[in-house]
Image: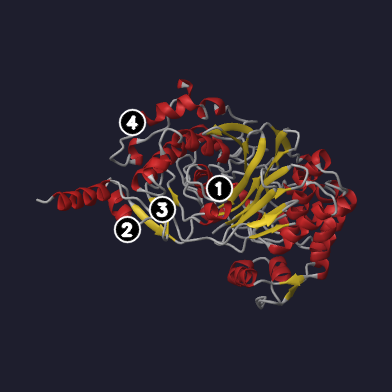
Amino acid sequence: MTSRSRALILSAAAALLFPQSRLPAASHAPVRGRNGMVVSADSLASSAGVSVLRRGGNAVDAAVAVGFALAVTYPEAGNLGGGGFMVIRMAGGESTMIDFREKAPAASTRDMYLDAGGRPIREKSLTGPLAAGVPGTVDGLLTALNEYGSLGREDVIGPSLALADLGFPVTDHLARALGGEIPRFAIFPSSMKTFTRKGRPYRWGDTLRQPDLAVTLRAIMERGAEGFYSGDVAARIVAEVKKDGGIITADDLRDYGSVERDLLVGSYRGYEILTAAPPSSGGVLLLQILNSLERFDLQRLGWNSSGAVHALAGSCQRAFADRSEYLGDPDFVQVPVGELVSKEYSAARLADFDSMRASPSARISSGDPSLADHQTTHYCVADRFGNVVSVTFTLNGLFGCKAVVDGAGFFLNNEMDDFTVKPGALNMFSLVGGARNQIEPRKRMLSSMTPTIVVKDNRPFLVLGARGGSRIPTTVAQIIANVIDFGMNVQEAVDAPRVHHQWIPDTLLYEKRALESDVVRNLGSMGYVLQEVEVTARAEALMIDSAGGWVLGGADPREEGYALGY
Ligand code: DON
């Protein structure tokens, strides 16, 4: 055999063992801004945020304006009737999280979604007001404004009030989303009245006016959180809920309060990671995944090579196995966060990782930390003062529980499905419910939302998050690795096709073009069950180039994301 043919055989064998994926096709250049940037899922909402920045508002003012605008222009997920998490880092280095996650109504009970035989009744935690938690968005946005903003309510709610009052042109995306829901809206006359043209679907280019929502926004603008949690709007919420079998009361609304909590702080290859703490599981999962990934030389393995995907999948499987065992609302159950996100714990969890074989999920149980289309939306804001904000908020499912509060013009969430309806049962994201996340009155349901800020040399560097339920933390981890390990710019990092593994189901999902065919074959022979999917999750991100003086926006082409700088 000639040395040339021997070399050919050797390189073919090496390709089989460690196939290297090529980087994905070219992305367009990131959107640039000198003074600031908003990246959100909707162009009108991004514009509303930038208009607030231009008028001298800071990133928190703009984030609040974007939140209210999304409630008007992006009703599938933008909301007044849902909840979420806002992660803030101020220019001076102070950082915090506003937890405005919904809460279980006081009359809720552990088994409220089970039938007499103890079996989950799927529809009960998904459709209609019984599926709704007490909304947190209005209190959360206004708390952020009061504590960290610099403008008044008129300045930040004004743009969305105008959009609700005067209307805006329906996009193709919104027309399709609303049209597709008509059969499910049909049982709620208020939803039909608000989001159809007398029963017929809105078409692309039609003007959508929302006069009832405008009344609600005006009440909030004039009276603050009181304008939502008491008075006419609250009475309308209670009436709507009662009409369709829900249990939220006037007391639940009056008692609702968002909470300012310490962020979760971790690190990845020398970068500081600020992310959401419980009751979101997102930040814990993110840090566990990054801590594990740090133990692999991803650069050497190559972007989405079998070795790199194997490392990622193994890290994700182990983190998700812990999620269902250990995580829940920290105001109600003990959550060993410090242990779970420690580097030592991740090292111990990888002790049984075999570099040549997939770890069957059935053989991964939770560790012992004492040893060491559906809808949500994410947006990011950076201002010229050096403040950055990362927000993910949601109704849970597409248009939440599908019921619009009559006369108030907004959808209620179906976030109760994020609780454990029954230990071991799967929720709408196929997440396994654990005991610490069981329903209790006034408790917050576990989330996967992962609004995150990456800090480099004490300056904000990357601001990001995603929508997509359980696929959010794995998406955020991959974008961070794309930037830090693979040197991608923010747009390339968001565009790059992704993979996902969440322990159960024991399936490795991959987006089209995420994996070369030889990588798919190789992972299959290592024991993975693979499934190609259209989209894992949708992300929005921005990056700050401190040396060059630019803010760079990366909106996700998987949705109509819109980065706008100025
Ligand atoms: O809080 C959570 O984890 C879910 N309610 C988020 C839902 C979601 O991301 C749906 N997105 N497309």
- The residue carrying mark 3 is 509
Q: Are marks 1 and 2 in contact (CB under 8 Å)?
A: no
Q: Indicate the amino acid at tag 4.
A: Asp
Question: Disc 4 designates what residue?
Answer: 352
Query: Of circles 1 and 3, which is in front?
Result: 3
Q: Nearer the viewer, residue 389 or 492?
A: 492
Question: Quarter of the image containing the C terminus?
Answer: bottom right
Residue at x 79%, y 62% (from the top left corner): 213
First in residue order: circle 2 vs circle 3: 3
- How far apart are the two marked residues, 1 and 2, measured between alpha carbons? 43 Å
Q: Which residue position holds label 1?
A: 113
Q: As displayed, is residue 330 above or below residue 167?
A: above
Q: Earlier in the sequence, mark 1 or mark 3?
A: 1
- Total tally of numbered discs in the picture: 4
User: Mark 1 packing: few (<14 Cα in 10 Å), some, or many (20+)?
Assistant: many
Amino acid type, callout 3:
Leu
The answer to whether mark 1 and mark 3 are in CB contact below 8 A is: no
The amino acid beneath tag 1 is Tyr
One can see residue 2 in this view? yes
What secondary structure is marked by label 2? helix
